Amino acid sequence: MSAHQPVLPAKEIELVRSRDFEKADALLAGFAAAGPIKTYALVREIRPAGGPTKVVRDAQIPAQDWERIVASKKIQAALDGGTVRLEGSLLQGGTPSVLITGISFSEAALIKVLDRYCVDSPVGVSKQSSGCDAHATTKGIAPSIAASEAKKGGVQPIRPGDLTAPVAQTEQATGLGRTTIDKLMRDGTLVRKKVGRRTPITVESIERLVGAKVA
């Protein structure tokens, strides 16, 4: 890790603010989730449901973990330097829970990104009005995050009284991916019912699988 000159979040926030960006914490998380900034953890624990815990020390944090941090609104907890818990699925094959302790950033990577996306101001023009726009920058370098959030926002949760649910809602309710959902439909764990031209999954079988109400 020393080759990457990792530094604590507080120093990185100070560096971002020195470029006149607003909401430095959210911007840092956005950079990390988009991928151009490398981040590290003193300890990263991966805890899959029904499987052994894998502990990795001095580990690089995947961008996917930062997407989960952003989505679960745990940015501040992540930048405070303690332990962040990302809850996973309770089902085997689902998204594992992850515990991340002691986050640090690659200062060299952050400086490179800021130099690219936050240019010096012309004489007599403030940085804030010359392109150091946190919102625009995040949108420019992290379109995948916006697309991901839009996709998530387009899936409505299963509502009370619903008897069936499409695959997208089933994925959302269980935390499982499409491949696992397809396997569970094939083996009959998730029951499908013909409704007109569609063949959605019964809510009863979803609740039986997760062992709890989903609406």
Image (cartoon, rainbow, N blue to C red):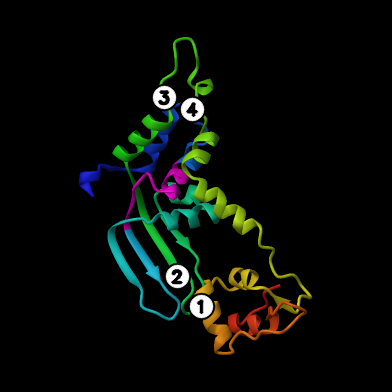
Q: CA distance from mark 2 to mark 1?
A: 14 Å
Q: Secondary structure at mark 2?
A: loop
Check if mark 3's residue and mark 2's residue have beta carbons within 8 Å.
no
Disc number lying in front (2 or 1): 1
Image quadrant containing the C terminus: bottom right
Q: Amino acid at mark 4?
A: Cys
Q: Which residues are magenta?
A: 28-42
Q: State if disc 4 and disc 3 touch (CB < 8 Å).
A: yes
Cα–Cα span, label 3 and label 2 = 40 Å
Measure the C-alpha gap from mark 2 to mark 4: 37 Å
Element type at marker 3?
A: loop
Splitting the image into 4 quarters, where does residue 196 fall? bottom right
Q: Which mark is residue 119?
A: 3
Query: Along the polypeptide, which appears first: circle 3 or circle 4?
Result: 3
Q: At 56% across and 86% down in the image, what residue appears?
A: 186
Q: Is residue 67 above or below residue 7?
A: below
Q: Which mark is residue 96?
A: 2
State yes or no: residue 33 in magenta. Answer: yes
Q: CA distance from mark 4 to mark 1?
A: 43 Å
Residue extending farthest front: 197
The residue under label 4 is 132
Q: Which is nearer the N-term, disc 1 or disc 3?
A: 3
Q: Earlier in the sequence, mark 3 or mark 2?
A: 2
Point out the residue furthest to the bottom here.
188
Image quadrant where residue 201 sits: bottom right
Tell me which label, 2 or 1, sits earlier in the chain.
2
Relative horizontal placement of residue 1, taking residue 62 as reference (left or right): left
Label 1: which residue?
Answer: 180
What separation in Å lies between label 1 and label 3 (alpha carbons)? 46 Å
**Residue beneath the point at 35% across and 53% down:** 102
| Residue 112 at x, y percent in the picture | 33, 35
